[in-house]
Image (cartoon, rainbow, N blue to C red):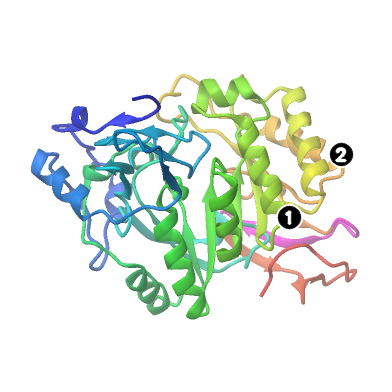
Amino acid sequence: MTNCVRLAPIIGGAGIVLSDPFWQGLLSGDDFGVALAGNSADAIDALVQSAPRARYWTSLHKDNVVRCFLCPHNCIIGDGERGKCRTRVNVKGGLRSLVYGRPVSIHVDPIEKKPFYHFLPGVQAYSLATAGCPLQCKCCQNWEISQARPEDYQGPYTPPEKIVRSASAGKTRVVAFTYNEPTVFAEYMLDIARDAKKQGLRCALISCGFVNETPLAEMCKALDAIKIDLKGYSEDFYRNVCGAELKPVLAGIKQIAKSRAHLEIVNLVVPTLNDSDKMLLDLIDWVLGECGPDVPLHFSRFHPAYQMLNLPPTPVATLERARDMALSRGIHFPYVGNVPSHPGDNTYCPSCKKALIQRQGFFVTEMNIKNGRCKFCSRKIAGVWV
């Protein structure tokens, strides 16, 4: 069978060692405690058998083979096999989600950390993730969970209503699906979002954007904000660095831009790989032409991680150059990201040029937007402010 990950060879895997205190903190708290799981055949079989039925697939009516259409990989999956994301398994001709109700990471973050700069600035976001991702980005900052298998972690089954109760009890205003690629737990995410809306909570997705039109349409209806990582304006970059394709991501961004959901875009600028003037200008011009000048565009600093430890951090001058190019092309809200307290991290009015939102790291220190308008010149500022 092609385009899948077989179930059998992963039995007996070593799992993931999370010795870093950061990760220990990220995976702890209340009754959501998470510990490393054993990868015995019995443990994996129990996980598979308890997994609920997935959505976004169809039977190919031969030998229990199915096709998953959650993401553009469109994996053809034989009985007992998984898709490339490692989170969806074919059990006797029915696709199941191994990550429904199985968060491995829960934390409360400032919304600016996602980053969202034009969506409820200053609020706290109840953030969660599962294992798995359809991409294999060589520079992934969260590879310990994005490239993990569900059986690498053990934790209690956590239904959507329990997530919503916990978020409400913590007095957070937003539930954020983040850290790994949340589209792999689309069914869980949508159920949480629908419950959260009933409780007056907003929901936000932090995604690579590698998702098919039908599930994305459901997400756009259920979610209030979506941030997409547009990793580079190059098919070669996507194939060689991310194990994916560019065109589906562009199609997804266009779809979100036409929806009711608030959209922001991030470009992680990686030295020597996607930082040429041509690639940056092509990306800027595409965003301007397809999404308009008011979509916030973040140029974020790369730091060596995962399989790209050989490259240096992005020079700040490169990010400043990208921001200047975006401004000169007509983008109203370009940002310098991952450089705390940089002037390019602030929000400026496109008309009077005064600072509307000043930030120190992930925290808002000054707010000059009132009723969605610049306090100085009354220009309407695109975003979700209340």
User: x and y percent of residue 41 in the render?
Assistant: 10, 39
* Residue at x-position 71% and y-position 62%: 357
Which is nearer the eye, 42 or 287?
42
User: x and y percent of residue 262 in the render?
Assistant: 67, 60
Residue type at numbered disc 2 = Arg
Which is nearer the eye, 357 or 165?
165
User: x and y percent of residue 238 in the render?
Assistant: 57, 27
Quick one: label 1, few (<14), some, or many (20+) residues within 10 Å?
few
* Residue at x-position 22% and y-position 44%: 151
- Magenta region includes residue 117: no
Q: Secondary structure at mark 2?
A: helix
The quadrant in which the N terminus is found is top left
User: x and y percent of residue 244 in the render?
Assistant: 52, 29
Q: Can residue 115 be seen in this snapshot?
A: no
Q: Can residue 331 be seen in this snapshot?
A: yes
* Residue at x-position 48% and y-position 60%: 176
Q: Secondary structure at mark 1?
A: loop
Among the 4 quarters of the image, the one containing residue 259: bottom right
Quick one: label 2, few (<14), some, or many (20+) residues within 10 Å?
some
Residue 258's disc number = 1
- Above or below residue 43? Residue 283 is above
Where are the magenta residues, as a range?
350-361
- Magenta region includes residue 360: yes
Among the 4 quarters of the image, the one containing residue 288: top right
Which is nearer the eye, 72 or 243?
72
The quadrant in which the C terminus is found is bottom right
- Above or below residue 276? Residue 163 is below
Of labels 1 and 2, earlier in sequence is: 1
Residue 302's disc number = none
Residue 329's disc number = 2
